[in-house]
Amino acid sequence: MQQSAVPELAHTHTRPIHWLATATAVAGVVALSSVVQPDAATAAQAPGAGPGSAPAAAAPPATTGVDFPLECGPVKLVVARTAAGDLDGDGRPETVAVVHCDAGMSTPPDGAYVLTQGPDTARARVVATLVDPEDRLKVTDLAVRDGAVLGGLLGYSSPDVPTCCPDVTENVKWQWKNGTFVRSTPSAARSV
């Protein structure tokens, strides 16, 4: 049997005084932590925050399980694109969802809907319709910037134009004003 090169040290054996010192130190830390507390939280909005910016902890509403006002019959509903941001300036993000029925051919019309998350509900709900599928429009672009929804639309110059071939292009903007979304056409609008 080989002997250890390091002699046995007295402090490697625990004694009751060691346990008493450890318990005293832990009690001191617990007592100190109950006295020292962080500043109280406030609900005030940070300077510079406004429409289009949301708190980092707030997640935009998801489209899963939402009852969109679109009847697709035997085919499924498709969420084609989404964009999120604070549209009404309340500090919570909304989601804009573009949906259509999964048609096997042609260009199915889109619906564009604003979703919000209620404080007492688990699922998001539709609170506004920006594009109604009955208008026979296709949403090509979608973005939320500075509290406004920006989109590109494809449409038809007359009912005689086949649904496969939209022949009108328009850029649009929706802004929350006086409790409703107001649609305008930015100066970069164009028609084909």
Image: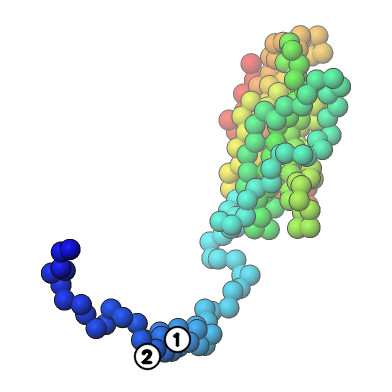
> Considering depth in this image, is 192 or 124 the residue closer to the camera?
124
> Is residue 133 visible to the viewer in this orientation of the structure?
yes
> Considering depth in this image, is 91 or 32 the residue closer to the camera?
32
> Considering depth in this image, is 170 or 61 the residue closer to the camera?
61
> Considering depth in this image, is 97 or 130 the residue closer to the camera?
97
When asked about the image quadrant of residue 12, the answer is bottom left
Q: Give how far across and how far down residue 83 sits, in percent.
A: 63, 39
Q: Give how far across and how far down residue 147 sits, in percent.
A: 63, 48
User: Relative to residue 163, is residue 49 depicted above or below?
Assistant: below
Q: Give how far across and how far down residue 164 sits, in percent.
A: 72, 10
Label 2 and label 1: CA atoms lie apart by 10 Å
Q: Which residue is mark 2?
A: 17
Residue shown at 58% from the left, 48% from the top: 146
Q: Point out the tag, 2 or 1, that comes first from the N-terminus.
A: 2
Q: Nearer the viewer, mark 2 or mark 1?
A: 2
Question: Which element is circle 1 on?
Answer: helix
Q: Give how far across and how far down residue 135 sits, in percent.
A: 80, 25
Q: Which mark is drawn over residue 23?
A: 1
User: Relative to residue 173, is residue 48 depicted above or below?
Assistant: below
> Is residue 177 visible to the viewer in this orientation of the structure?
no
The C terminus: image quadrant: top right
Which amino acid lies under the numbered mark 1 shown in the image of this protein? Ala
When asked about the image quadrant of residue 69, the answer is top right
Residue shown at 83% from the left, 30% from the top: 70
Residue shown at 45% from the left, 86% from the top: 23
Which amino acid lies under the numbered mark 2 shown in the image of this protein? Ile
